[in-house]
């Protein structure tokens, strides 16, 4: 068998696998839409206008307000990103430019280890250690949006740190050495050359961190309190979309079940949007051959 025929078969196999992946996403999207239609048709604007979430077997006797749940998801996600993004970028800069090679190697392995810990372990840590500590030091309840933000931030920190470090490492070494030869200091090189060149990869890391934070389930179920209301402060208990599905899908029927599928549809559309945004950022990244923006 010639090499060209082997390459051709591998190419067709890869195309088949890619088509199967696309078909699977389309089928999942179709499944979510079809099961969401009854709730969208029966409840309509009530999914936004109802002030609380108390489903009943008959839709007319229950309330299906998803707005507090969506707000809970957004606040936990944005709070976690606000903490994890600068810490992850700082970790990447330290590991790539400041740490001695042996220290950087050990540090990188520790960050990779953090990335591999299951989410339920983080949730158990938050439930057993962090939430009681928050209740004791700050204010009750410890199971709150603040606890969820801290736990999710720790979970997504390795993702942002590792991808940001890869983006920093992709900056051409000759460019950095040339700037150093011209007399620029280390921080000036980072600020003026490295960070602008790696901004596409850093933004990609942040977006992927957002995607993981939005889809996190077990940890937020265990530490956020799961009370459906619009939070007035970071110490209020909240419920996220993922937690809502995990807690209620097992016993839901009729309109209640369909409303939970609306939650799943929102999550999938969010994931698709973030994936498209990552692809757009990578196309515009000069390090990936994109056009970039003129500075």
Image (tube, helix red, strand yellow):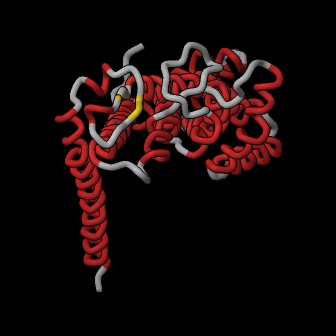
Labels in figure, total: 0
Relative to 109, is 48 above or below? above
- Residue 275 visible? The answer is no
Is 237 positioned to the left or the right of 3 in the image?
right
Q: Residue visible at 61% across and 33% down?
A: 225
Q: Quadrant of the C terminus?
A: top left
Residue 281 placement (x, y as % from top left): 38, 30
- Residue 155 visible? The answer is yes
Q: Residue furthest bottom?
A: 1
Residue 127 picture quarter = top right
Residue 180 picture quarter = top right
Residue 261 picture quarter = top left
Residue 10 placement (x, y as % from top left): 31, 71
Residue 184 placement (x, y as % from top left): 68, 15
Q: Nearer the viewer, residue 243 or 175?
A: 243
Q: Quadrant of the N terminus?
A: bottom left
Is 83 positioned to the left or the right of 215 in the image?
right
Q: Nearer the viewer, residue 265 or 239?
A: 239
Q: Nearer the viewer, residue 60 or 28?
A: 60
Is 129 positioned to the left or the right of 66 in the image?
right
Q: Residue visible at 37% across and 48% down?
A: 252
Q: Residue visible at 24% across and 68% down?
A: 12
Relative to 134, is 40 above or below? below
Q: Residue visible at 58% across and 38% down?
A: 220
Residue 251 placement (x, y as % from top left): 42, 52
């Amino acid at each position: 068998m010639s090499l060209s025929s082997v390459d051709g078969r591998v190419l067709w196999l890869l195309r088949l696998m890619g088509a199967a992946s696309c078909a699977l996403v389309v089928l999942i999207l179709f499944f979510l839409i079809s099961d969401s239609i009854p709730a969208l048709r029966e409840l309509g604007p009530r999914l936004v206008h109802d002030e609380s979430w108390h489903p009943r077997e008959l839709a007319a006797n229950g309330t299906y307000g998803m707005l507090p749940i969506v707000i809970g998801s957004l606040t936990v996600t944005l709070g976690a990103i606000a903490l994890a993004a600068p810490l992850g970028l700082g970790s990447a800069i330290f590991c790539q430019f400041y740490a001695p090679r042996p220290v950087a190697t050990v540090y990188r392995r520790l960050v990779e280890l953090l990335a591999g810990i299951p989410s339920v372990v983080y949730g158990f840590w938050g439930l057993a250690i962090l939430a009681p500590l928050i209740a004791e030091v700050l204010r009750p309840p410890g199971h709150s949006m603040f606890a969820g933000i801290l736990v999710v931030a720790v979970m997504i920190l390795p993702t942002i740190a590792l991808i940001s470090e890869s983006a920093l490492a992709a900056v051409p070494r000759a460019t950095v050495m040339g700037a150093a030869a011209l007399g620029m200091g280390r921080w000036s090189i980072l600020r003026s050359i490295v960070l602008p060149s790696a901004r596409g990869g850093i933004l990609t890391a942040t977006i992927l961190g957002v995607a993981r934070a939005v889809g996190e389930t077990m940890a937020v179920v265990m530490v956020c309190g799961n009370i459906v209301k619009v939070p007035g402060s970071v110490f209020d208990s909240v419920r996220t979309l993922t937690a809502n599905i995990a807690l209620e899908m097992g016993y839901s029927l009729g309109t209640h079940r369909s409303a939970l599928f609306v939650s799943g549809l929102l999550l999938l559309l969010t994931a698709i949007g973030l994936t498209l945004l990552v692809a757009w950022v990578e196309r515009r990244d000069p390090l990936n051959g994109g056009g970039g923006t003129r500075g």
